[in-house]
Amino acid sequence: MNIAVFVSGRGSNLEAILVSAELKGLCNVSVVCSDKLDCPAFQIAKQNNIPFFSVSEFPKNGFVTFQELQGIFAEKEIELIVLAGFLKLMPKEFVRSFSFKIINIHPALLPSFGGKGMYGIRVHEAVFKSSAKVSGATVHFVNENYDEGLIIDQAVVSIADVQSAEEIAQRVLKLEHQLLPSVIAKIAQRRVEIKNNRVYLT
């Protein structure tokens, strides 16, 4: 299965996908995309000889548009789009054209601590201030709104003893690096089913 990975930062989840033993022989990262021209994760793409693109909703120097990206994805036979720390909301038309073929990883247990502006350390600060005793990571299908698509899978970690939002971030990131490749593997193996607006893993 050919996948495209979208990133906005250093790309630790991209790296986790590339080194995952679970994904060997199951999927191939064919394209890396970012909303930035100088995204740090592009270095990982270069090291692995993966084509990479900066993408924008509107035409800009150095960027391809989402419409142009659809043509690139068709050529490369992309079957799944993975948002691995991608912070921009995708255009509605693009999301509709890849219905249930776009997944996102969120660094909290949705539906709590999600939505517009809830990304990165902001999420963990909100979790810390809430005095929650557990946090975790969520992989969900992407719809037209931030963090509202059907939840595919979640992983949970105790944060009862943490002293800072940064500690939560460290624990959750470890979960992300396990959970995201696991979900991608299940999708590649056709082990994800949707029934009655719920997602089941077989």
Image (cartoon, rainbow, N blue to C red):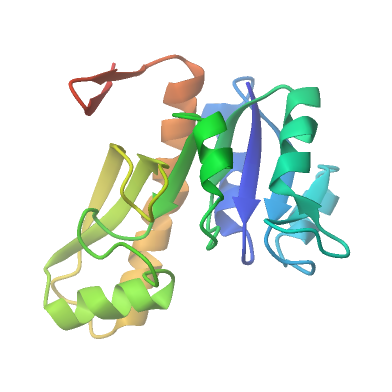
Provide residue 173's location: percent of width, then percent of height.
Answer: 42, 61
Residue 23 higher or lower than 16, as above or below: above
Residue 176 higher or lower than 49, as above or below: below
Residue appearing at x 24%, y 55% in the figure: 109
Residue 37 higher or lower than 197, as above or below: below
Rendering quarter of residue 186: top left
| Left/right of residue 99 with respect to residue 68 in the rendered view | left
In the image, 110 versus 202, the foreground residue is: 110
Residue appearing at x 42%, y 69% in the figure: 119
Provide residue 157's location: percent of width, then percent of height.
Answer: 23, 57
Residue 167 visible in the snapshot? no
Residue 186 higher or lower than 31, as above or below: above
In the image, 184 versus 38, the foreground residue is: 38
Check the picture and name the quadrant holding the C terminus.
top left
Residue appearing at x 67%, y 56% in the figure: 57
Residue 23 visible in the snapshot? yes
| Left/right of residue 54 with respect to residue 148 in the rendered view | right
Residue appearing at x 66%, y 38% in the figure: 4
Provide residue 164's location: percent of width, then percent of height.
Answer: 28, 84
Provide residue 60's location: percent of width, then percent of height.
Answer: 82, 64
| Left/right of residue 182 with respect to residue 68 in the rendered view | left
Rendering quarter of residue 68: top right
Check the picture and name the quadrant holding the N terminus.
top right
